[in-house]
């Protein structure tokens, strides 16, 4: 590993596991009697436990947010450019927690885990989960770690939905919410993309109704196609044109169905790589998590009413070329927060990268996050009783 990069990294990290034996009732009504969550931490928790930051992962990520593994130095955390010493989320100041959510396939209890009632992998029997279920389990992890209130909860895309949900499910437990490349619910078009991806998996002959572990196989063909569909939505048209255009691998058409265009090669490579490490049953469930997120649903369609319990301060960030979660959707969130007279900072960044921009090292984006976390770091943390029956003024930043 390059020493310049390593010097700015949190360095070698080790995943940890928390086991929970108290049953949890999910939003679907299903009950999981016991479960494990795999997580990583970076930096040090201060004496009054006021500098903790929870990072919520998006669709295909997990607990490995920053740093690298001693036995696999090439396996760098998915948001390593954001989190570390001197980085926008400075681990010299903040104690950062990353967690693999319930239903995941990176160590936390999910479809690949053994169902204690049957002694076999859960497979298709693992229940469908929601953002609300994830937030509930994350709150239990916070209790396990001795963290009563997070200085911030942050995430991009599906991770941002969790950061938003924290503020109305646990309003006294989060001081700041950083909501990046988000939407208050999925559009019909987005649900459609997810359904096509799911059908690619479900109709794979190796799927076996979700119990493919017992058949010693994997629906890799379907998972490859699902991932290819996803990647098309993560990039903007301009970014795809800049990267690949209509470039032919051999300089001229072969008049066949082999891989000819560079964009075809890219999509097939991404699909094949993804199918080697991700579980299809988890992919099905996480796309449903996205589909079901709709905080306004239980409030007569009013997002403002859904967000009314929130007490946090907010940073909401969107990217101009993100057509999957467009800036207009972020502005819906901002309006609902302002309707509740909450403290909101909104930034719309002119970036060419599409939805994936939240993962990339754009200097303006990183300066914004760094400045906001500097603000958090300079704040005097609330006292032990803050947030409980308190009165304070609210208004836009």
Image: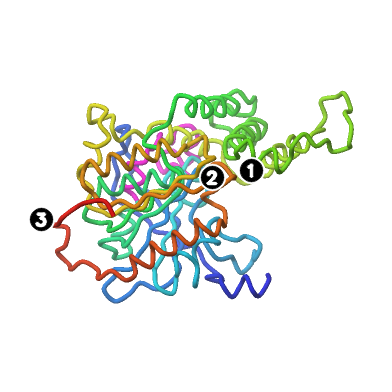
Q: CA distance from mark 1 to mark 2?
A: 9 Å
Residue at x 61%, y 72% (from the top left corner):
6
Residue 125 belongs to the span the image colors magenta: yes
Whether residue 23 sits left or right of residue 82 in the image: it is left
Q: Give percent across and percent down for residue 336.
A: 27, 39
Mark 1 lies on a secondary structure that is: helix
Whether residue 81 is visible, yes or no, is yes
List the residue tagged with mark 2: 60
User: Foreground: 190 or 119?
Assistant: 190
Residue at x 28%, y 32% (from the top left corner):
296
Whether residue 369 sits left or right of residue 300 in the image: it is right
User: Which numbered mark, 1 or 3, is in the foreground of this view?
Assistant: 3
Q: CA distance from mark 2 to mark 3?
A: 39 Å
List the residue tagged with mark 3: 389
160 to 174, vertically: above or below: above
Q: CA distance from mark 1 to mark 3?
A: 48 Å
Callout 1 touching callout 2 (CB < 8 Å): yes
**Looking at the image, what colour scheme do you see?**
rainbow
Whether residue 222 sits left or right of residue 341 in the image: it is right
Point out the stretch of residues depicted in magenta: 113-137
User: Foreground: 328 or 11?
Assistant: 328
Query: Which of the two labelled residues, at mark 1 and mark 3, occupies the earlier sequence position?
Result: 1
Q: Any mark on residue 47, and which? A: none
Query: Which of the two labelled residues, at mark 1 and mark 2, occupies the earlier sequence position?
Result: 2
Mark 3 lies on a secondary structure that is: loop
123 to 84, vertically: above or below: above
Q: Any mark on residue 274, and which? A: 1
């Amino acid at each position: 590993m390059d020493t310049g990069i390593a010097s700015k990294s949190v360095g070698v990290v080790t995943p940890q596991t928390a086991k929970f034996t108290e049953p949890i009732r999910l939003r679907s009504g299903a009950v999981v009697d016991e479960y494990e969550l795999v997580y990583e931490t970076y930096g040090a928790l201060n004496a009054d436990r006021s500098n903790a930051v929870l990072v919520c992962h998006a669709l295909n990520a997990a607990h490995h947010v920053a740093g690298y593994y001693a036995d696999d130095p090439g396996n760098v955390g998915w948001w390593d450019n954001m989190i570390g010493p001197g980085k926008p989320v400075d681990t010299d100041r903040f104690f950062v927690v990353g967690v693999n959510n319930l239903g995941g396939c990176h160590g936390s209890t999910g479809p690949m885990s053994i169902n204690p009632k049957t002694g076999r992998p859960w497979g298709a029997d693992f229940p469908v989960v929601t953002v609300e279920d994830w937030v509930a389990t994350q709150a239990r992890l916070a209790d396990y770690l001795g963290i009563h209130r997070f200085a911030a909860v942050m995430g991009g895309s599906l991770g941002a939905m969790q950061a938003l949900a924290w503020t109305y499910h646990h309003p006294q437990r989060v001081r700041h919410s950083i909501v990046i490349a988000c939407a208050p619910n999925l559009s019909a078009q987005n649900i459609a993309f997810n359904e096509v991806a799911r059908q690619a998996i479900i109709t794979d002959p190796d799927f076996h109704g979700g119990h493919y572990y017992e058949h010693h196989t994997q629906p890799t063909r379907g998972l490859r196609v699902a991932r290819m569909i996803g990647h098309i939505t993560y990039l903007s048209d301009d970014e795809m044109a800049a990267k690949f255009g209509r470039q032919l691998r051999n300089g001229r058409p072969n008049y066949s169905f082999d891989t000819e265009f560079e964009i075809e090669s890219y999509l097939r490579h991404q699909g094949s790589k993804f199918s080697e490490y991700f579980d299809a049953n988890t992919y099905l469930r996480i796309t449903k998590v996205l589909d079901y997120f709709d905080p306004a649903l239980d409030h007569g369609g009013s997002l403002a009413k859904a967000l009314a319990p929130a007490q946090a301060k907010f940073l909401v960030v969107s990217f101009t070329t993100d057509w999957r979660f467009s800036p207009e959707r972020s502005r819906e969130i901002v309006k609902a927060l302002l309707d509740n007279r909450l403290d909101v900072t909104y930034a719309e960044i002119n970036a060419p990268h599409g939805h994936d921009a939240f993962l990339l090292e754009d200097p303006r984006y990183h300066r914004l996050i760094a400045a906001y976390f500097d603000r958090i770091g300079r704040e005097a943390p609330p006292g032990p009783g803050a947030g409980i029956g308190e009165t304070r003024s609210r208004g836009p930043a």
